[in-house]
Amino acid sequence: MSMRIAVGGGKGGTGKSTIAVNLAFELSKKRGRVLLVDNDVESPVDHIFLGGDRERIIEINSFLPTINEEKCMKCGLCIQHCPEHALIGLVGQHPKLLRDLCEGCKLCYYVCPAKAIEEEKRTIGYIYRAEYRGINLIQGEVLPGVKQHTNVALRTMQYANRFFGNYDYVIIDSAPGTGANVWITLNEADISIAVTEPTPLGVSDLKRYLKLVEKVGKEAIVVINRSDVEGGNKEIIYSLSKDNYPIKGFIEVPYDELLIKSYVSGKLVCELNPKASSCESIRRILDFLD
Amino acid sequence: MTKVPEIVVASGKGGTGKTTLSSFLISSLSLDGYMIVGVDADVEAPDLVIGLGEGKETSRESIFDSSIAVINYDKCSLCEECYRACTYGAIKWLDKPIITQELCEGCGVCKFVCPDDAISLVNTKTGDIIVKETKYAKVVLGELEIGRKHSGKLVDLLRDKARGLANDSDLIIIDAAAGTGCPVISSIVGSDYLLVVVEPTNQSLVGAGKVIDIGKHFNIPTGLVVNKYDLNRDFIDFIKKWSDEKGISVLGFIPYDKVVVESYVKLIPLIEYVPNSNVVRKLLEIREKLMNELKIRGVLG
């Protein structure tokens, strides 16, 4: 059985991807086969840390209606039913589609008594694969302007899920926030790593994230990234009680110039500087995974 | 009644400095006599009020405008029509159809295709809409029910609420969520100016590029702000070229400074915590450029 670890935390920019890719690197070096799933489909960046190359392997499509005007009776039923108001027009006119609003639910197709709504496929995103130093990456990405990011996240997880059995560890990098797309990643996981920063913003978003972890019946290792950053206050993170939140433990990753340097150059700190203080701390997460 | 101009701050990638910039604009403009209404459009991780030194909650209403499907198994004949029709993967088949609430859009396809009349749609809570009074401005924020969809719809409602409160105001300033998906699109549509905050990294430009494309799609004038630019000076020329290619102007560069984190921890906005600092000077320059852009474009009188 593989161990599945969802990396989240609520707030954006706390270092989820940095922790996820470096942890994947350490696990693949020391523990076994690692699959990294980048499920931050709105802003996926894990491939940048893994050499930058990626191969597009799957097109994610959704339903988009086209109206066959010869068959359309102009009854207006599709317009009445469309939950996103993506079909507009008056009774007596052919309906007009506002593509941006359509979420592909297909209700119009079913309600049309004249079978005048035909199925057109619309690409809403892609799944990519990459391989770097023993880490296999599966990455989902939604196309810009497409509203169905949750659907792309779900389809990426469903695709990745088929390969979980081939790996000892599966690391799932999630989007910021606490919505349905983050729920999708947590739902697949055995345990979560919640990455936060030592500020009131970090703790506020972490609380909401830990509520979500609790809701799916899991536990989280809280990683306080840049724990000693100047001006910060890590005590506000430690003030979260294990009685009220599903916290398995805390790990501090100190502010580290070497990490910043490798981050901005799109590299893994644990590969470039295995002895860096940040990397030593990231390795301590492994102890929690026994 | 003329429309109050709306400025939206977005980034694509999280943690680049959206809240730092939007809370600065709100606090500093308010101290200079402008009437501002703030909107925290990150309903999954709302932080704007913290950036304004916290505030007092003056109203809270729960929104029950989303629906989810519920199956009456006494009527269900196990025909699998609903399972096949759901395009959101919200119906699993475990000897019978099971609805996954978190994935249900409430579109009603399953109800429509069910031949047994076994499915109904029930109203469910989307989240709360809250107004907080800060020292500088009223802020409208939302709290999405944890783990739910419909964040975009909640953002639409927040913006309506803010417009209702902004009768005598000069500006509405919207702090968008991280990402490029539905809630961010809802934050950008209908705004008068889009501010995109990036860090000097390739990781940041991935999301920022998409946000800029969304702005373009809806014809919204856009400006770029580069935060923590000095963490990677080599990247600056590239960003300038990149923004030229995208056809947007760079409004300014903000240096990395520990006072930003400090001011958050102390709950005192930068403009009051370190009014004479280099960071505040740079932020004020950006603010002036922004106000000029708004005047040139006729957004602001």
Image (tube, rainbow, N blue to C red):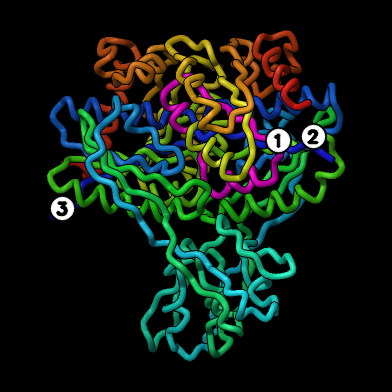
Tell me where residue B196 appears, x and y as whole percent: 42, 35
Looking at this rendering, what residue extends furthest in the front direction? A243
In this rendering, the answer to whether B145 lies above or below A258 is: below
Specify the label residue B2 is tagged with.
3
Tag in front: 3 or 2: 2
Q: Which amino acid does label 2 sit on?
A: Tyr
On residue A169, the disc is 2
Q: Are marks 1 and 2 in contact (CB under 8 Å)?
A: yes
- Left or right of B265 on screen, residue B36: left
* Measured Cα–Cα span from mark 3 to mark 2: 57 Å
Examine the rendered structure and indicate whether residue A208 appears above or below residue B257: below
Is the residue marked by circle 1 packed among few (<14), some (14-19), or many (20+) residues within 10 Å? many
Amino acid beneath label 1 = Ile
- Secondary structure of the residue carrying tag 1 is strand
Say the numbered circle drawn on residue A5.
1
Span of residues in magenta: A177-205
The subunit carrying tag 2 is A
Quarter in which the C terminus of chain A is drawn: top right
